[in-house]
Image (spheres, rainbow, N blue to C red):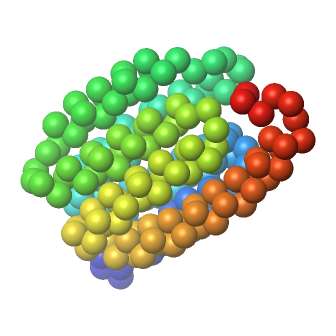
Amino acid sequence: MDSFVVAQILSAVAAVIFISSIQFKDKRHIIYFFIASTLIAMSALALMGARSGLMMNFVTLLPTLYIYRQGKHRRRLKPATAWVFWALLLVGWLAVYSGPVDILALIGSSIYVFSLFQRHENNIRGMLVVNQIAWVSYNLVIGLYTGAFFGVCFIVSDIVAIKRYHKHRRWHRRSTHHWWK
């Protein structure tokens, strides 16, 4: 089997894991599945020779692990930390920049980093829709077609999750006096 086919298969496996992650309500479960899918997606990107996509995925693991660690210890996230991780992302991107298509990887990864620092899961999901639009475009350009296809599937799944949890949240707001929290 050549590396193109293996990359497509790995991309499909990573995408299925990533799509299923967004259906969880708990932020920690979303992060667990994201870490697993990112590691598999990095293998596919390496096989495709997509250095910027590989670097952006690697760097986005850092804030993901940070968020996981902070959540485990029930610490409050500081928004300024998102800018530190974005600066790391920018440095990594500049280190491997090879052409205009790499801008798509930077945009997608930047949106992801800032989505991690959102308080509400639906805000994360909404930002990930925009994130996936950038990654779908990037995957189409580099030839990772299964990644692009599953990116579209992820967008649809994400919108379903937003609607499902938004409906629940509206009901919850009506049943409490402190809807602004």
Q: The C terminus is located in which quarter?
A: top right
Report the residue at 76% width, 49% height from top: 170
Name the residue nearer the viewer: 92 or 4. Answer: 92
In the rendered image, residue 26, in percent from the top left (x then y), is placed at 73, 44
| Left or right of residue 151, residue 179 in this image | right
Report the residue at 20% width, 50% height from top: 103
In the rendered image, residue 15, in percent from the top left (x then y), is placed at 51, 65
| Residue at the farthest right position | 175
Residue 119, located in which quarter of the rendered image? top right
Q: Is residue 38 above or below residue 82?
A: below
Q: Is residue 117 above or below residue 29?
A: above
Total marks shown come to 0
Q: The N terminus is located in which quarter?
A: bottom left
Report the residue at 49% width, 40% height from top: 115
For residue 45, say whether it is visible. Answer: yes
Name the residue nearer the viewer: 118 or 89. Answer: 118
Residue 157, located in which quarter of the rendered image? bottom right
Name the residue nearer the viewer: 180 or 168. Answer: 180
Report the residue at 76% width, 47% height from top: 169
| Left or right of residue 71, residue 78 in this image | left
In the rendered image, residue 32, in percent from the top left (x then y), is placed at 63, 45
Q: Is residue 117 above or below residue 45?
A: above
For residue 24, say whether it is visible. Answer: no
| Residue at the farthest left position | 99
